[in-house]
Structures are given as C-alpha cells and as structure tokens.
Amino acid sequence: MKCKICGRPAVIKLPAHNIALCEKCFEEFVLRRVKNAIKTYKMFTKDDKVAVAVSGGKDSLALWDILTRLGYETGGIHIHLGIGKYSDESLQKAENFAKKINSELTVIYVRDFFGTGIPEIAKITKRKTCSVCGTIKRYLMNRFAYEKGYTVLATGHNLDDEASTLLGNLLYWKDLYLARKGPVLPSTHPKLIRKVKPLVFLTEREIAAYTILRGIDYIYEECPHAAGATSIFHKHVLNEIENYSPGTKLHFLKGFYERKNIFARLYPEETKMQHECKECGYPSSGEICGFCKLRRRVKEKLENGRETTTA
Ligand code: SF4
Ligand code: ZN
C-alpha cells in the first residue's frame, strides 16, 4: 500500500476519502481538515486567544497539539471532576502535555466550589451523573475562559461524537437540542464565550492514529460513568453504516449543518440569556443560574450532614 500523495509506504487507509497516506502526508491531512473546519464555519482567527477544554483524553490533547502547530495562540483549561483515580490521572496527562508544548494550563477543582466531587453531587441532587457533570463543566469552562481573557473556547468533539449525538436527537426528534447543535455556538452575552468544535471533520480513528504518530500520551481509560451510554451504541450503528458505505458519517453531519437553521428557527429566543445570575454575575435564563442553584443544594446538604454527625 503506497501513499497516494508521495508514493512512500502508507501507514493508514482512509476509505471515506478513498486514499492511503504515509505518516507525513497523514499528519498534513489532519492539519488541513482542522484548518478547513475552522475556515468553513468561521470559528476563529489568528487574532483570537483560544482556550482548549483539555480533559486529558486523546481528542482534547490532539486538538491542543494541532491548534498549536497551526500557529494559534492557545492555552488549556482542565476541570478536575473529583472522580477518583480517573480524575487524578487525567490531570496528570493534561499537565504533562502542557509542559511538553510549553503552554499554560489552568486547573479548576470541582471540590473547591462544591466541597465534593461529581459522583457525590449527583447522589445528593438525585440527578444523572453525566447531566450534573455537563452543567458544571459548561459553567466552569466558560467562566474561567472568560476570566483568563480567552476569546473562544474549543472542545475536542469529533465527527463520531457529533454524528452519534445527531442520530440520537433525530431518532427522538429532540427539536430543541437540534436547534442548539452546531460546530459553533455563538456568544449571546458579553460573559458567554463562543464555543467551537474544530475536530468535526475528523473521525475517532483518525484522531487516535494522529496521537500515536505524534507520541501524545493520553488517558486510555474511559470515565467510569461513561460505560453503557446510548451514544456508544449509536456510534456502533454509524460505524456499521460507514463500513458499508464509506463517507456516510461525514455526509450526514455536514448535511445537518447546512440545514440546521430549520431547527434554530423553531426556537428564536432559546439562545438568549437575558439575566445575570444574582449570585455569580454570569449569564442565566433565570435570576439564579443552574450552577449556583446546584451549589446551594449541595452545600446545604453537606452542612446538614455535618451538623447531624456532630450533634
Ligand atoms: Fe462527566 Fe464522566 Fe459523564 Fe463524561 S462520562 S459527562 S466525564 S461523568
Ligand atoms: Zn450563578
């Protein structure tokens, strides 16, 4: 198998693009795909200061590596979720990588805000772990990106993540989610940072290959709460379709992005944050934001618990 571009021995076959590439041409292919997504969806320019949401996994570290190689001004933000060994190892990987590329990493601990980690917060509030985790991560990422002077927040969502969520939302006709979904989430308030997904044109397999070739050391273990998620099943279904008809995944997602306004028009007021939270001052749809409400509930519960044990 030879590289379609330079004729050297190929290291990877990309059926969706009908090519095989050598190491060097594959790395260039990856950089080009990301550059293309940034340009196509007008994500950011060289004047922006880009915060990369770094989990310590392969996608976010590959994203940080790629954006740095493309010459963007970047820094990482990592949220320590308080999920035992998984969180400690994730932080370690993020810190090692920041050192390697000589870039700034901001680390935020969930326990500094809640007095405990995500699993306990979910238990106290009787909410699903990933739902609580999502609310907290979104808030903290936005807040610290803003406070640190970044102008845009980039996340490592890849083609498989986006296509599988899209499939799930379509299967159950979740119009509201479809209205919000896209490669760019614009800022609708001065304290709400624009969010972008520069890896949407790359599959999980392509990103994994890139991290191996670049020697990027990431956390292999999945979060213990991720197992069994419906999105894993949807990814599997999409991979079956992709094997049968290469390129379908990309076509599916790009086609949606071209038509997404159909859904956005159904909820014209949805993205507007009209208030500022009375407690933290950050954008909110009500008087108190979801994050502060959550914090109150957890703190009350923890304090009551302490009183009962010391009484
Ligand atoms: Fe948070 Fe883990 Fe759920 Fe991801 S899988 S949202 S890290 S709890
Ligand atoms: Zn608040």
Image (spheres, helix red, strand yellow):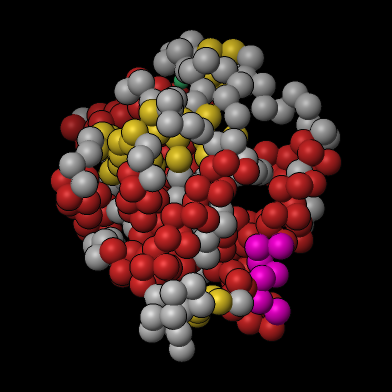
Give the percent coordinates (x, y) of residue 151.
Answer: 44, 25
Q: The C terminus is located in which quarter? A: top left
Q: Is residue 9 above or below residue 227?
A: below
Q: Is residue 127 visible?
A: no
Q: Residue at x 33, y 36 (%)?
A: 74
Classify residue 284 by image quadrant. Answer: top right
In the rendered structure, the answer to whether residue 37 lies left or right of residue 124 reads right
Pick the front one: 194 or 124:
194
Pick whichever, 7 or 101, lies toward us.
7
Residue in the picture at 40% in, 33% down = 50
Residue 227, magenta (yes or no)? no
Residue 256 visible in the snapshot: yes
Which residue is drawn at the image coordinates 79% and 53% (left, top)? Answer: 173
Residue sitting at 75 percent across and 55 percent down?
255
The range drawn in magenta is 245-251
Image-based side of 142 in relation to 196, left or right = left
Query: How many numbered tags mark residues here?
Result: 0
Estimate the x, y position of residue 280 in percent, counting from the top left.
42, 16
